[in-house]
Image (cartoon, rainbow, N blue to C red):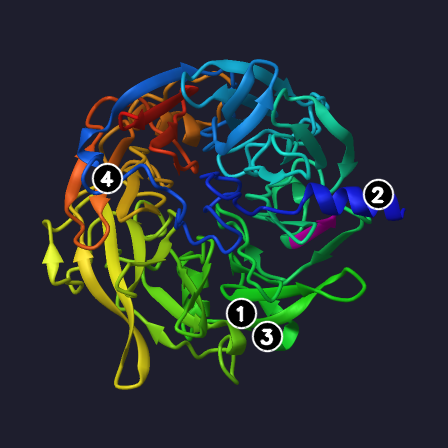
Amino acid sequence: MRRCAAVAAALVLAVVVRIGAADYLTAGVDAQRTGWMKDEKIFSLQNVSGMKLLWKTKLESTPREMHNLFPPLVVERVTTARGPREVLVVPGVSDDLFGVDARSGEMFWSRHFDSSSDLANGAPANTLCPGGQLAIPVIAHSATPGKDVAYALSWDGRLRQVNVADGTDVAPAEKFAPPNGKPYALNLVNGVIYTTLAQGCGGWPNAFISYDLATKKSSAFLPQGGGLWGRRGPPIDADGRIYMGTGDNPYVPEKKNLGNAIVAAKIDGNQQLQYNGHYAPKNANWLFKRDLDINVSPLAFDYQGRKFLIATSKECRVWLLDRDNLGGADNRTELYRTPLVCNDDQMLDAAGVWGSMAAWQDARGTAWVLVPFWGAVSKTFHAPIEYGRPVHGGVAAFKLEQQKGAWTLTPAWLSGDIDMAEEVVVANGVVFTYGSGEDTRQQGIERAFDEPPPPAPNTKGVTAQSARRIASSRHATLFALDAQTGRELWSSGNQITSFNHFSGITVANGRVYVPTYDGYLYCFGVAQ
């Protein structure tokens, strides 16, 4: 047992970045999910305008409902049979994993996990619960340089340990999560893997879950709230606390029902996840009634000796919280709450914040928070620098600062129009974001009472809602913005020909990767 523990500890030394490398080993760049790529040295404000399409590769990944490829993880120095390579590990929803050469786009290994052919036991998939591999993996460096391990969670709930160099198994698959659920991106800290289960998929309760690689012990904590569907998965701070927002349930704390709240949990001495605090907005039950879930992974950000948690929701405002006093004495008090950024009509779809935020600190010591949003900017939101008034989505930037002794988020700039603005990643003073181009209308197409509905698209094996949205989606567009002013420095224009749904982007070593619904992985970058 000691030997197994030592091997596991060596294997997971960590999701830390080696000196000189710019690896992207976990969703949101780091365990705190800040979206700040601190080690990027190639992109700059001076060269990003020269970005071009370096390659695009079609991967044989079968879509499920609206999902297909997820953003790749990046390991810069991997010892392969073809020599040292920078390797992309690209997850596909249908239990696939691909190893791709970052420079050329060549796929040189692929895996299809040996799950049961029908883990849903005949139950039909749908847009919210498509089945398949839904969690972005996480990668850890091993004690031997160039021998890295990707941890992936397959549809059957087993944890896979895959050699990044060739796609072979490093260890047998182990039971971690229930099958046919909806887990989100994996996180790995101190030899323990974490994720959350969401939306009751597969009939399983929504929960935080953990798996200790050394002892092979699993744990679960159920906050009795729905949701837990932040796409980057749960952030984990330096104190070992794990966070996620809940939704789809009322907030009734006397019954331990923590719907529409930000919940913290932590592993105890018996390796069990336990409640560690929560914050519920004062309008939590109104949010529940309007289906304005807390649907985005919060991020943990330390600044000037303070431990912040930054969170948002479909309502389209941002909460600034103190991680050491989450919610205050009444669990309902934030450090600061912004006014509405978007979603004046408080719609449950096609508006609000859905993509992952970012936080970073510039060379002068100023801290910034970046918030992508869908739909029109609020009529009441204004920033000192604006590039128009977005109609389809955009990015709002705030400065995290003190005013009269109180912490606040001060509007700094507002981007131009971005078609359903999604995940934000900051690298060397450049903001990378994208518009997904997705039809995000869950409730159908508005029409007059006497107007016949449009003909239903015939998409084999896909439910009606997904088929309609796939047919009426547009195309994704990647943007590079000046992180301090919001000025557009570059965009991909019409070069990407498909959309993506609940996916993301990856930034590393002078390249940005964008996966799309039609199975392509695009690579944009600067000359090196």
Q: Is mark 3 on a helix, strand or loop?
A: helix
Ranked by sequence position, the earlier of labels 3 and 2 is 2
**Residue type highlighted by circle 2:** Cys
> Does the magenta portion include 498?
no
- Majority SS type along the magenta span: strand
**Residue type highlighted by circle 3:** Pro
Residue 1 placement, left or right of 228 = right
Residue of label 3: 253
Ranked by sequence position, the earlier of labels 4 and 3 is 3
Tell me, yes or no, if residue 155 can be seen here.
yes
57 or 430: nearer the eye?
430
Name the outermost residue toward the front.
19
Rounded to the nearest angstrom, the CA distance separating label 1 from label 2 is 43 Å
Ranked by sequence position, the earlier of labels 2 and 4 is 2
Residue of label 2: 4
The segment highlighted magenta reads 208-212
- Residue count near mark 2 (Cα–Cα under 10 Å), binned few <14, some 14–19, many ≥20: few
Residue of label 4: 480
**Badges 1 and 3: C-beta atoms under 8 Å apart?**
yes
- Residue count near mark 4 (Cα–Cα under 10 Å), binned few <14, some 14–19, many ≥20: many
Q: Is mark 2 on a helix, strand or loop?
A: helix
Quadrant location of residue 161? Answer: top right
